[in-house]
Image (cartoon, grey):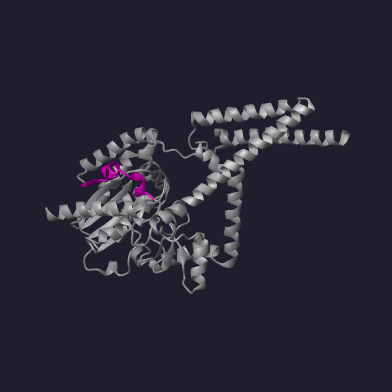
């Protein structure tokens, strides 16, 4: 019938035209011309060719007889529905990983978002705050100072990978420590590093520093998520000369500390100045300013209007991710904004200067700097990463040795673990309580043996 043919023609032409448009747009977004990729792989090149070929086939399909055109349109829609069904399954699987980790560890599963946890705590009269990171603001050119810790003496809500959120009361300088440690007459150990030193995302008493405190009760942690070498050096220069810890442990993470974090930190107008003799921001005496700064950064997102804005942004991001099949593409290595480490651009001379300055500062008060090398999970599951990373690892360890810095190599700890997956909350996550326990015990044992010599 004429009406049915008209509807069939409209349906087929719309589906095929949209298919051509979307395929061409996706090819442009995936290409280096869009500036969306940090690196460009052969797999992405093939993906672009496939998309351009699909766009051409869709346009050619418009020239097919009507019956064939309708069949092609129905097939395309069926494939599209199937792909989005896979996206749904993958997203559900990722969301379920935290739930499964909680069941495996015997934790209660908290399905709330970080924002919901903060709002619930605030309704109970607790001035809860989200965790804040210096890495988020370090490249701003309008800063009068760069804070290294967070807001002091507040309930801090962080992340959830094991079923329960990491929630802790920040110390006098905004770090993840029990209150009062800074007032100890002697500090045994100071721990530096990124999220693994901070204790993401396990209970507040299950992190590396808590394990070390069983042997060395006066252990301070300056660990903060996304810290790299220059931020770690800044922590040493700002906070440790006054407390003079006997041992300073630099928990170095091979996954990003050198291959990406250092490049970002070099762009900071403040951080490279810590290599200048005597440079200090005097942060221990500026905590009131630091607290005011961070409150100004986060407060807008914590009032009622800010809640709505955050929720709206979150929903928009989820929708964009869904439409762009973000999870599906990631699962097959076709991220449009892939950030693969570029091992060829590692700044070894700068890293050597940082290590040398850190060693000299610590030895200046009679302390010892120890370098603890934490391997990346990727090294055990991605052979290409492992091969590319091995020369970097060898150079780092050689540099540490040449500088006379004691080494704790944690790689054998992971290599010899029969159930390596049990050391992580789940694949791609931070360490599990068991993983933090093993790392903390290995560091404690090494420090104890060194002390007894």
Residue at image position (71%, 36%) is 18
Name which quarter of the figure residue 206 lies in: bottom left
Residue 112: give x, y in percent of width and height. 51, 61
Name which quarter of the figure residue 311 lies in: bottom right
Residue nearest the viewer, comparing 148 with 327:
327
Residue nearest the viewer, comparing 200 with 244:
200
Q: On the picture, is 95 further left or further right than 411?
A: right
Residue 28: give x, y in percent of width and height. 61, 34
Residue nearest the viewer, comparing 420 with 327:
420
- Quadrant where the N terminus sits is top right
Q: What range is drawn magenta here?
A: 406-424
How many tags in the picture? Answer: 0
54 is higher (above) or lower (below) than 121? above
Residue 198: give x, y in percent of width and height. 36, 56
Name which quarter of the figure residue 224 lies in: bottom left
Magenta includes 431? no
């Amino acid at each position: 019938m004429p009406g049915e043919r008209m509807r069939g023609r409209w349906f087929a032409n719309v589906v095929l035209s949209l298919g051509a448009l979307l395929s061409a747009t996706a090819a442009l977004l995936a290409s280096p011309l869009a500036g969306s990729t940090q690196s460009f792989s052969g797999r992405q090149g093939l993906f672009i060719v496939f998309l351009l070929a699909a766009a051409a086939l869709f346009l050619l399909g418009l020239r097919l007889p009507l019956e064939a055109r309708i069949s092609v349109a129905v097939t395309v829609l069926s494939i599209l529905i199937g792909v989005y069904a896979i996206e749904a399954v993958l997203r559900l699987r990722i969301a379920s990983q935290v739930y499964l980790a909680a069941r495996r560890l015997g934790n209660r599963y908290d399905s709330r978002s970080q924002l919901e946890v903060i709002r619930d705590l605030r309704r109970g009269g607790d001035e809860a705050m989200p965790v804040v990171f210096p890495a988020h603001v370090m490249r701003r050119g309008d800063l009068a100072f760069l804070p290294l810790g967070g807001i002091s003496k507040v309930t801090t809500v962080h992340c959830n990978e094991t079923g329960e959120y990491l929630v802790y009361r920040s110390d006098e300088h905004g770090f993840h420590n029990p209150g009062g440690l800074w007032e100890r007459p002697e500090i045994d150990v100071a721990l530096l590093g990124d999220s693994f030193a901070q204790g993401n995302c396990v209970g507040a008493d299950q992190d590396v520093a808590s394990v070390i405190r069983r042997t060395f009760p006066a252990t301070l942690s300056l660990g903060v998520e996304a810290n790299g070498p220059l931020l770690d050096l800044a922590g040493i220069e700002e906070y440790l000369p006054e407390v003079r810890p006997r041992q300073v442990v630099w928990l170095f993470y091979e996954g990003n500390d050198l291959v990406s974090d250092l490049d970002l930190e070099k762009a900071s107008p403040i951080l490279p100045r810590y290599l200048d003799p005597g440079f200090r921001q005097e942060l221990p005496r500026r905590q009131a300013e630091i607290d005011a700064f961070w409150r100004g950064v986060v407060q807008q997102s914590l009032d009622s209007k800010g809640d709505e804005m955050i929720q709206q942004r979150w929903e928009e991001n989820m929708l964009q991710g869904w439409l762009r099949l973000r999870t599906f593409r990631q699962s097959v290595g076709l991220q449009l904004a892939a950030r693969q480490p570029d091992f060829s651009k590692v700044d070894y001379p700068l890293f050597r200067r940082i290590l040398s300055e850190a060693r000299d500062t610590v030895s200046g008060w009679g302390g010892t700097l120890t370098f603890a090398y934490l391997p990346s999970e990727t090294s055990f599951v991605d052979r290409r990463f492992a091969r590319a990373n091995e020369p970097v690892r060898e150079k780092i360890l050689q540099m540490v040795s040449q500088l006379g810095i004691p080494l704790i190599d944690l790689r054998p700890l992971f290599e010899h673990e029969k159930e390596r997956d049990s050391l992580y909350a789940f694949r791609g996550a931070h360490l599990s309580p068991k993983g933090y326990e093993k790392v903390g015990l290995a560091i404690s044992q090494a420090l104890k043996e060194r002390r007894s010599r």
